[in-house]
Image (cartoon, coloured by chain):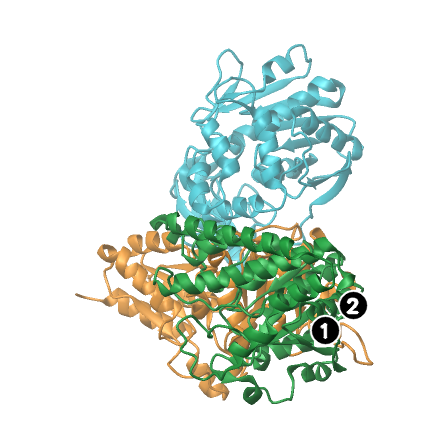
Amino acid sequence: MTGTLASPASQDLTADQLLDAYRVMRTIRAFEDRVHEEFATGEIPGFVHLYAGEEASAAGVCAHLDERDAIASTHRGHGHCIAKGVDVTTMMAEIYGKATGTCRGKGGSMHIADLSKGMLGANGIVGGGPPLICGRALASKHKGDGGVAVAFFGDGASNQGTTLESLNLATVWNLPAIFVAENNGYAESTSSTWSVASDDIADRAAAFGMPGVIVDGFDFFAVYEAAGEAIARAREGGGPTLIEVKFTRYYGHFEGDQQLYRGSEVAEAQEKLDCLKRFRARVTEGGQLTAEQLDRIDAEVAKAIDDAVAAAKAAPKPGPDDLLTDVYVSY
Amino acid sequence: MTDDRIQRVTMPKWGLSMKTGKIVDWLVSEGDTIAKGDDIVDIETDKIAGTLESPAEGPLRRIVAEPGAELPVGAVLAVVAPTDVPDAEIDAVVEEAKAAVASGSLEAPDEPEPQLVEVGGRTISYLSLGPEDAADPVVLVHGYGGDKNSWLFVQQPLAEEGHRAIALDLPGHGASGKDVGDGSLATLADSVAGFLDALGIGRAHLVGHSLGGAVVAKVARDAPGKVASLTLIAPAGFTPEVDAEYLRGFAAASSRRELKPLVGRLFADESLVTRQLVDDLLRYKRLDGVDKALTAVLGTLLDGDRQALDTRALLEGVDVPRTIVWGTSDRIVPVPEGVELTRVEAGHMPHMEAASEVLAAIKAHL
Amino acid sequence: MARSITYREAINEALAQEMERDERVIVMGEDNAGGEGAPGEQDAWGGVLGVTKGLYGRFPGRVLDTPISESAFIGAAIGAATGGLRPVAELMFIDFMGVCFDQIFNQAAKFRYMFGGKAVTPVVVRTMWGAGLRAAAQHSQSLLSVFTHVPGLKVVAPSNAYDAKGLMIQAIRDDDPVIFAEHKMLYDTSADVPEESYTIPFGEANVVREGGDVTIVAIGRMVHTAMEAADELAGSGVQAEVIDPRTTSPLDTDTILESVENTGRLVIVDESNPRCSLATDIAATVAQDAFGSLRAPIQMVTGPHTPVPFSDALEDLYIPDATKIAGAVKTAVDWKA
């Protein structure tokens, strides 16, 4: 079935949970905004793809996950990394290509991974994640640990054969897998309304025998509720779910993208729909948290990002010996 | 009527799997008078290269198999007969021999298969040749990293002479179970003693090579009543000196390149090391559990760079007749001082390099 | 104890023994059991050529049939490997690599390096290769060189039942992604294979035959063809050394170089297409590292630069035979500068 869930009451989460969620989203926003600034100086090598605007998706889904669970991400992976608990300092260093990076400088923005945190990596191949997630879900099922695996992918990947095969396989094998289609309206410069043949990506769920649901990606609570239901179902052996998260990315496809293909949706979203603004309004108006608590988090996060950037800039680059290491466990 | 003084030298059977052998070179010529035990011809099988010692005595009248010829086990290689036997009769024997090969009637009959027996929770593989009801069988125990096939020049002849000759694989070796527990001499000796019990053998002539020598000595110490005699071939534990590098290298080697030169050190004549021999050793070493077994037993054999065992001390006061055989060119364990022993021209493997002398030493007890 | 079993049985036995020993080993692939969801027998096929037969019943829940979705299930095997399982997935024909190659070469092969040494991906991808079955262009290719080219992958191509069992056990125990290539024409060949489990290290070539006049390096089924040629050549007094690399990544170049330093002549037999092949790879390495020992140009005996033809008359022309190999040896032996 395809449906849009109404946003749940924020009373369902504890104060601590709300603070955590806010911290995750604020960290992602601050991280991405800062990378946007720093990238413009030319010091960061290669490509970066920024997640600003989409924080509610990563935060809302990962709030339900623990060390049993795995996620796979896309080239736009910083948000998922942060939400799954990957250390921000090592992430920043990785983006700068330094030896202290999460991947010792050998992966870069598009391949940041921390398997110890169940983060299977940002992925440079569109649609590369869903099959891997079927595998992690299979492993959890085999081990019987109640773990789930979540594939984050974009509207572009929703048309990739690997994604569709994975949806099919997850149902056929009844895997504890959750497929989160983050529909930010564009696959690079191509609009999703044009490239996705069905009205909604979530419509494809029925084709593959699993429930599909659409959520407002600017609403943390909507994502949280839909994800919670899907993850609970998966943990209990109820099989996979497809969640389509609809929102907008604030930056270009990659840093350097002139975004000539876009209308005015970013300004509108930042003004009226922004997930952090909405979250703040809701929890303060509802009395769960105070503005001061949130401001404190803003300040802590700002400092953490500052420190991360300073550390990254100061860190050494990998040396010639690092070129040849870690191709194999042993050869 | 063929003169029964005509003796045929035939292709020997060296080991269970041997079907054919190739003549490499004759060491004697037609017209020479040969004595029993003389080296007469070099033969190569796919497992080993060796020298046939003459079973016959007298003038060598005819060489039937030329160098390069590959012939089945049992094929006539040469004819030995007194000079007054007419040539025509020798010719007839040769014709008959050639016909036998051509007809395929020399195809090997079904060979006895190795068997398995459970001893103290371990599986022991063994090959028994010769009459099952023979008294006091000969039991042959190989050395470190070896197996029952190393007795190929000794076991068959013993059986042919009416003795029961049993070659076994120690735990961790050959086709026996690979678990050796602590790998101690006591564990190995218990397996051998247990083996005798399992087969209902009250008393046996024990023959041991290298590590196997120490093992059978321990059996004799623990249960002298079970042991009719001991023939120890270059046994471990008679001297502290040993080529520790060989032992450690053997345990660690995992490729042909590493193993071949090491195995060469075992022999006085390195050409005895065929590719097949090295390959067979590698196949053994790759089996699950072998690494662990060899390492454990290595700990029993070595104390630093010296031998850890003292077999001499073990045998003190053990009232069992014994012979010790040693190769004068042994590069693994040098000939010990102050021990009565039979010297033979060989390296560390007299039972392969000087088989007839080892056979004689064993038979002296039977 | 060794007994004579087939290449197919040897691989089956390796899988069974490892599945027995380690509960993390699972098997998956199209029709690896067969009969899934159908009204008739389960384990109806045991793999298209029967390699996985019997495992389904012995190891409940650990032999998974798959839909025809190579990207998804090869990717799943890879993902599961990062999650603590040791999957053996079947890519039925190596020719199908096109529909799942990303998961193999961009994901599995690169995780360890891209993630700074922190990923372990112990997946085995079993696959059938080789010509001779009249299976035509899309079911008869070699393609080993394509996988060999990719850093992060290991590539194994046994030529006989003994090597097949030992190398498969090694592959399952190996912590890196392994492409295990089974030559479809070798499934019915037999060899003495121990009942016990054993391993054969990767990167160790087998010198199948010793000889001082020429080095022949051959892969897979071509090892047997090379031995045929070697027997023929021995009749005219040329002693060939035949080397079976067993694994193309890692490749035992030391053994090949040592042999060429002794013989001075190299003939490489590789049934694949000639451009950018294992033959050119080995030839270039030897030319660079043993140039001074060469007494004749390196000879490569390969298939032609064509797809594999269907008609038996043509396929038999495509595949190198003993005569072609002997001819190449003769060229090398007769070479005058």
Above or below for B90 versus B185: below
x and y percentages locating residue C280 in the rendered image: 34, 68
x and y percentages locating residue A272 in the rendered image: 59, 75
Q: Is residue A90 visible?
A: yes
Amino acid type for the residue under numbered disc 2: Arg
Q: Which quadrant holds residue B119?
A: top right
Q: Which residue is mark 1?
A: A241
Q: Which residue lies at the image location 50% right of the left edge and 86% below the top edge?
A: C312
Q: Chain of mark 2?
A: A
Above or below for B136 versus C250: above
Q: Residues within 10 Å of mark 2 (few under 14, many from 20)?
A: some
Q: Could you say which disc has been placed on residue A208 in the image? A: none
Mark 2 or mark 1: whose residue is earlier in sequence: 2
Q: Which quadrant holds residue B158?
A: top right
Tell whether C260 sits left or right of B147: left
Question: Marks 2 and 1: same chain?
Answer: yes
Colour given to chain A in the rendered image: green
Measure how far apart labels 2 and 1 are at the Cα level. 9 Å
Q: Which residue lies at the image location 55% right of the left edge and 87% below the top edge?
A: A195
Q: Residues within 10 Å of mark 1 (few under 14, many from 20)?
A: many
Query: Viewer-proximal residue, B297 or C57?
Result: C57
Query: Viewer-proximal residue, C189 or C129?
Result: C129
x and y percentages locating residue C156 in the rendered image: 51, 61
Colour given to chain B in the rendered image: cyan
Above or below for B305 versus C201: above
Q: Is residue C191 visible?
A: no
Do the numbered discs 2 and 1 sit on residues whose CB atoms are within 8 Å?
yes
Q: Quadrant of the C terminus of chain B?
A: top right
x and y percentages locating residue B212 in the rendered image: 61, 28
Amino acid type for the residue under numbered disc 1: Thr
Q: Could you say which disc has been placed on residue A233 in the image? A: 2
